[in-house]
Amino acid sequence: MTEPGDVDVRRYKVGRLIGRYDLSDMGGELVERWIEREESLRTLETYFNERVLAAAIDQRATGPVTSPVEELYFALTDDEASPGERISAVRQLERVDLSPEELRGEFVTHQAIYNYLTEGRGVSKPADGGDPVRREVERIGRLKSRTEAVATDSVDRLSKTPHLEISGFSVLVDVSVVCDRCGIRYSFGELLEEGCSCPDQSTTD
């Protein structure tokens, strides 16, 4: 793994946050995710900020926070979050003496991630950009895993209330693609890796 040379990574906001919250593994992990796993900078932005939010809650919260970090971060930063989601997140954080505005001020942009990786860590993407099919399959796989985690947490929390009774459960997330021409259904990965097997009907009589 490429390590920073003479450059002081504390010059970069990402590096300062890594030090502030004792995220000692984060520098190398960002490099690995960007270069080896080919994750996008915006994906890394979300991942890093969620880790920062989790660390801030662990270090400074005066009580428990019930919502998952992913849901809190979404509510604080995403334009698609509903007013109710934003209000709930703000109230939860304020109840444990955390300032939502201060937390937002600690979040970094994807450009900050890029500057840290390329200038602070001295790494760069391969020129060919890697295999686009594998990259998309892995991207959807990560989204499926995240959806499964959030859904599992939701069911688990509701099962401890009078709103839902269930003795045990498993959450399954499936992404399928159906060809409009032949009607065959494929898993996302199967279609991208093998293509559709329906006959070519592009010719005319």
Image: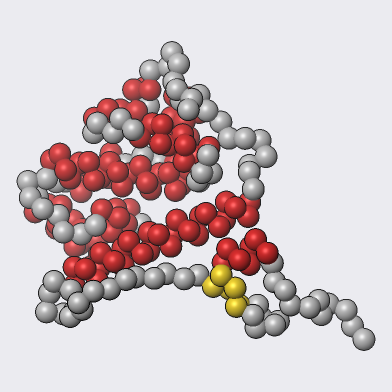
Judge from the rendering whether residue 162 lies leftward or rightward of residue 51; answer left or right. left
Residue in the picture at 43% in, 13% down: 6
Judge from the rendering whether residue 81 lies leftward or rightward of residue 204; answer left or right. left
- Image height of 184 relative to 57, above or below: below
- Image height of 152 relative to 35, above or below: below
- Image height of 34 relative to 95, above or below: above
Tell me where residue 14 appears, x and y as whole percent.
35, 32
Residue in the picture at 48% in, 25% down: 2
Considering every residue shown, the one lying at the far bottom of the view is 205
Tell me where residue 124 appears, x and y as whole percent.
56, 31
- Image height of 126 relative to 119, above or below: below
Tell me where residue 151 appears, x and y as whole percent.
31, 67
Q: Is residue 111 visible?
A: no
Tell me where residue 25 appears, x and y as whole percent.
33, 33
Residue 49, quarter of picture = top left
Q: Is residue 116 visible?
A: yes
Where does the C terminus fall, quadrant-wise? bottom right
Visual colour scheme: secondary structure
